[in-house]
Amino acid sequence: MLKRKWVVALAASTVLLAGHALGADKKVVAVSIPAADHGWTAGIVYHAQAAAKEINAAFPDVEVVVKTSPSATAQVSALEDLSAGRKLDALVILPYTSEELTTPVKAVKDAGTFITVVDRGLNDPTIQDLYLAGDNIAVGRNTAKFMIDKLGGKGNLVVLRGIPTVIDDERIQGFQDAIKGTDLKVLDIQYANWNSDEAFKLMQDYLAKYPQIDAVWANDDDMLLGVLEAVKESGRKDIKLALGGNGMKDIVKKVIDGDAMTPVETPYPPAMIKTAIYMTVANLVGQAPTRGNVKLDAPLITQANAKEYYFPDSPF
Amino acid sequence: MTVITGSTPVKPEREWNIGWADVGPFVALIALLAIGFAVNPDFLSATNLGNVITRSAFIAIIAVGATFVISSGGLDLSVGSMAAFITGITIMFMNRMAPDWGVSAIPAGMVVAIAVGLLCGLMNGIIVTVGKIEPFIATLGTMGIFRALITYMSDGGTIPIDRTLRDAYRPVYFGTIAGIPLPILISIAVAVVASFILYKMKYGRKCAAVGANEDVARYSGISIIKTRTIAYAIQGACVAIAAICYVPRLGAATPTTGVLWELQVITAVVIGGTALRGGKGHVWGTVAGAVILELIANLMVLSDFVSEYLVAGVQGVIIIIAMLIQRFSK
């Protein structure tokens, strides 16, 4: 760790020296993301900062600047601040909302900046040079497929959904389309707002209401934590599977440890911001063509590949 | 929101003058239980009722504290964030001390929780009374402060409790004494102490007097500043007690812990018969109010009538109907 710090410090000073030497030649990549206000965005901040550190160390003529904003309005101001002082070569942005950020990002684009949009699209897709996102429908679909396999195509399910948004709708839609035609029956589906406390209560109520539940799907890992606690406390033995989604480290750890009730996980990884930053820099530095749409799949995380998705130092 | 007018403090304060404000919440509670049983017989099963009443304990304990604040003519919007903040500090303290102190880090952490709670409450109280800032604005400010602090402390993620403490601490939420879950016993104990303070001690009468009419109270020689500040401190201590029971449930604090609890707390107090503009407080009504809120949410899940999209709407309607029944059955 100490050694790594030295390397970083050395690299940083090289960057400074190089900066003085090259001056205008240094390429600036601004990264604008939401501030950490829950697990997933905390992961975004962590991975964006990690990427910035690594790239600044590896490429002396590139400077990655990360700016977090607590609201859509603040993000608009941040864009103005970032682009006011200097010319940006590239902007990587995870927009708070599509509506409010579209025009400000267009203004940055018009100044000749390469635009990478992550996760949430803008209203006008012609603005972006690179769009990178996960696949929420696949999150639902792949979880459902695993359940169908594991339960032999029949059984009673309960589902916990998040906050009414497109993300939540897509996950639920992917799940329901996949179980159509099988004998898996969704006994109940209710909102628990991606909150572990609400999920704990809801799961207790499900357990009181239904004497036989074969599997639970909480479409996010925060909720899964509440579900697992409620199941554990009830002492019920009928629940064979309790699955989540997103790739929280605690849950990925369970997969690594071979947990019986949560043997797999479906990623919608906040580390995707890192993918986006690296691809953007690849275009600037290595002239690698990166314009286009990239959709990260949501492959099942199993014991075999879980290490790839496990970030013990990340807050998420 | 000042639906209840029956609880005017003009009534003789001495005991056993049972009016609708006292009985109303319990009538509503019994009605709700009957409806619940009709909808789904599982509703009255011991496990379900045990679960529901246990998890209403947090709101009940905090709401007992809020009864003091509201009765004295104040308001505290910061309780949800404060609960999250205290939970975070407590867990961090316990984790830090666990390697040296072992399991005795738990009681030490509880003491820290209460101390932090008292301080937070005192701060709210002093801003409101000495600083003479409207309670709504003052506690809206501290609500933001506490929420930001827990987000900062957790880097936006979670603060989990040390694994070595987890099992030792678990019984505080999941344990039972004589078959009754511990959180229920703790909230009853809190309510007993609170009703003693509010109905049998001089401070209780001062509280209601200040809330009912500030000027009259001042002319009678009651210190408004002292009375209200103490009410906020009691509120802080109650939030800390709730936080102590909360930690073992999920074993972690996150930036979303306790979100919107303040509204549930205020609703519980008002359903319980205490007027939002101050005056006589109804501790046991408040406890019933907290249980009613949790029962309604439970009933929504156990019944099959309501679309998942409409749950919040139906809950709102039920609360308003319950209040109207109380008002017109006088």
Image: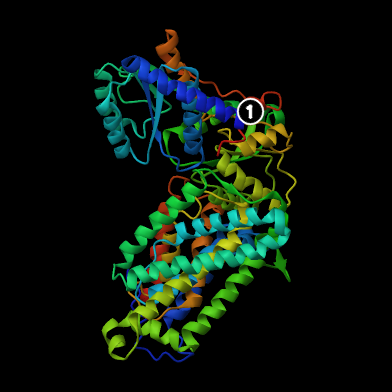
- Residue B276 at least partly seen: yes
Residue A107 in which image quadrant = top left
Chain to which the residue tagged by mark 1 belongs = A
Specify how the rendered protein is coloured: rainbow
Residue A29 screen position, x and y as percent: 38, 22
Secondary structure type for disc 1: loop
| Quadrant placement of the N terminus of chain A | top right
Q: In the figure, is residue A260 to the left or right of B265?
A: right
Specify few, some or many for label 1: CA neighbours under 10 Å numbering under 14, 14-19, or 20 or more. few
Residue A138 is left or right of residue B202, and the answer is right
Residue at figure coordinates x 39%, y 85% from the top left:
B206
Q: Is residue B291 visible?
A: no
Residue visible at 51% across and 71% down? B287
Q: Nearer the viewer, residue B247 or B101?
A: B101
Q: Quadrant of the C terminus of chain A?
A: top right
Numbered disc total: 1
- Residue A11's x, y, as percent? 49, 22
Query: Is residue B173 rendered to the left or right of residue A38?
Result: right
| Residue wearing tag 1 | A182
Q: Looking at the image, which is closer to me, B327 or A199?
A: A199
Residue kind at label 1, given as amino acid type: Thr
Q: Quadrant of residue A140?
A: top right
Q: As rendered, which of B321 and B266 lies closer to the eye? A: B266
Q: Position of residue A254 (x, y in %)?
A: 69, 37
Residue A162 in the image, given as x and y percentages of width and height: 49, 41
